[in-house]
Amino acid sequence: MLRAMIRRTLLSVLILFLVAIFVFLATEVLPGDALDVYLSEDDVAVMTEEDIEEMRHDLGLDIPAPIRFFTWLSGAVVGDFGVTIVDQIPIGNIIFHPLLNSLQLGAIITLITMPVAFAIGATAGYWRGQRTDAVVSTTTIIGYSIPDFVIGTVLIIIFAVWIPLFPAVITAYNKAHPMELLAVSLLPAITVIIGHVAHLSRLLRAGFIETMNSDFVERARLSGVPERRIVWRHVLPASVIPTLNAMALYMAGVLSGLIVVEKVFGYPGLGIELIEAVDTREVHVVQAIAFLGAVLVVVMNLLADFAIIALDPRVRSHVSER
Amino acid sequence: MLVNGKSLGAILTHSPGTTVGVILVSLHLLNALFAPLLIPYGETQLVGQPMLEPGHANFLLGTDVIGRDFLSRLMMGGRTSITVAMVGVLGAVLIGTFFAVSAAYIGGFYDDVIMRIVDTKLSIPGILFVALFVVGFGRSVTVLTIVIGLSYFPGAVRTIRSQAMTQVPLAYVKAARLRGESTLSVIFRELTPNVVEVVVVEFAIRTSSAILIVSALSFLGLGISPPTPDWGLMVSEGVNQIYQAPWLILFPAVFISTLVVGLNFASDGLANALGLDAARGLHGG
């Protein structure tokens, strides 16, 4: 078991290293570098070749890319992503509070989504192929098909414009108190939860059905264990294992799933920071946020696989082969 | 035409939901194809006073915030994102099929390298992946199409590879090898025809997901740029007039939603009819 876990961890480290190379390449080697952001066309027109070279030197752009990559990576590992191009502000300072705000909203959403999705998935799985299942399936397809910017803006039209219960735009700023943010999180949270519950409950339904069809459930049924007891004592606990991967996949996507809804409601999170960074071509901020997003995905998947290795003896050998 | 012993008609009407989906998608595709011939005014022309209400004598759905015909813009508003999504995903699925099947057949180090690249991409969440490219290459329809292709390529490889893995140990593959067929011939003539169903379902599911992503990107200002009409963009443009003219948001919202709902009902039905599971990895990729 330990061997499988170590193998799996090493694989995660390798993937994170590849992600770091990709994220670095995508922004450093693409046409135009940080200097394009720093200088306007007018600046370039009045500057001589030497001035520009000197500037590149000051910004460290004349250092070979592999060396810059390792400098960047060694900083990134300890949370130091360098400074912004235009204002030279440490990127850690810029993204710290938005990251916390997004994590808070993500946590609220996750805490509500998981039990609701589990209940819906188990219900639909139990009555699979019947009316309840058909209704749930139809509703969930609609639920994850409607874009979240549509759900969000329509909620604003209903609950801010037609029935003025909420403000249309959140005015809280980056360093707002967590409680203040909590108070304005209701509509953004509902917006995201609709799509997430729809998607997750579908995955959980599949896991539940898989468990219902497994041999040990069949054996329990044949030896006369009451159906109710089978579901509560055997199927539900066992269906947690196929559920874990779905949950990990889901939780890994929570932060990036907030980008749109933060923009819709003006919630001061990482998504707003990302869009602003793309607009102003602050490549290092985009880099940092993309890297953080990937770290979350890899860590969540790793934890889920750990749990599965620990809980399910059958997959121990499989996981180590992947 | 028969697929898996089922006629195309039987697949398209597999369940009531499938039928509804197929009808919605057909209506949207017909509109997208023929909109340029049907629209009353040019979709980027200023033709009247700004923000006229729906029901106006000259403008059925009124005009937008700078006085363009709203109906014309709505009808044209899906063409770009549908094209970007379909071309991007088609490219991803076709090239992905080759890499997936060859990885499953050849195996070893080649397979390992491909799968680690796939894992790497799958670790970077969709919108962040696109943001990395947009910040480097700027926003244009070409960049967007290529990025969508790159975004869906790894997911396609993973799904199709696992289907191909079930085929590789079968007798017909071994027989082909013993007959002296070349590696490429086994990949293209023997294995690929046997993963076609998965490829088709993959294309259907990923296209609807790509349309969602493209419209979300346009909403965020990272996708299709003005003055091209696009539903995602129209919703974000309408936000400033949310109190005076909520219909500027509601109409494009209905159009984009019916398209994606239709696509997902249709592809879910397609997957069920072919005995495949559509639920896996909808947000992945």
Image: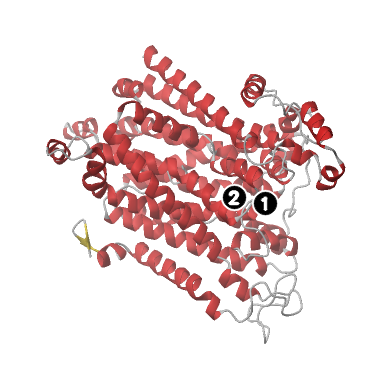
Amino acid at pointer 2:
Thr
Residue A129 at what x, y percent from top left?
A: 29, 52
Labels 1, 2: front one: 1
Does residue A162 lie above or below A55 as drawn? below
Q: How crowded is mark 2: few (under 14 residues within 10 Å), some or many (20 or more)?
A: many
Residue farthest toward the bottom in the current orientation of the protein = B57
- The residue that mark 2 highlights is A191
Q: Is residue A145 visible?
A: yes
> Upstream in the sequence, badge 1 or badge 2?
2
Q: Can you tell which quarter of the image residue A19 is in?
A: top right
Residue B92 at what x, y percent from top left?
A: 43, 48
Residue B273 at what x, y percent from top left?
A: 27, 56
Q: Residue A264 has which mark?
A: 1
Which quadrant does the C terminus of chain A fall into? top left
Residue B130 at what x, y percent from top left?
A: 58, 44
Q: Please indicate whether residue A301 sits to the left or right of residue A89 in the image.
A: left
Residue farthest toward the top in the current orientation of the protein = A2
Q: Do the residues labelled 1 and 2 touch (CB within 8 Å)?
A: yes
Amino acid at pointer 1:
Val
Q: How crowded is mark 1: few (under 14 residues within 10 Å), some or many (20 or more)?
A: many
SS under mark 2: helix
Could you say which is closer to the camera, residue A162 or residue A247? A247
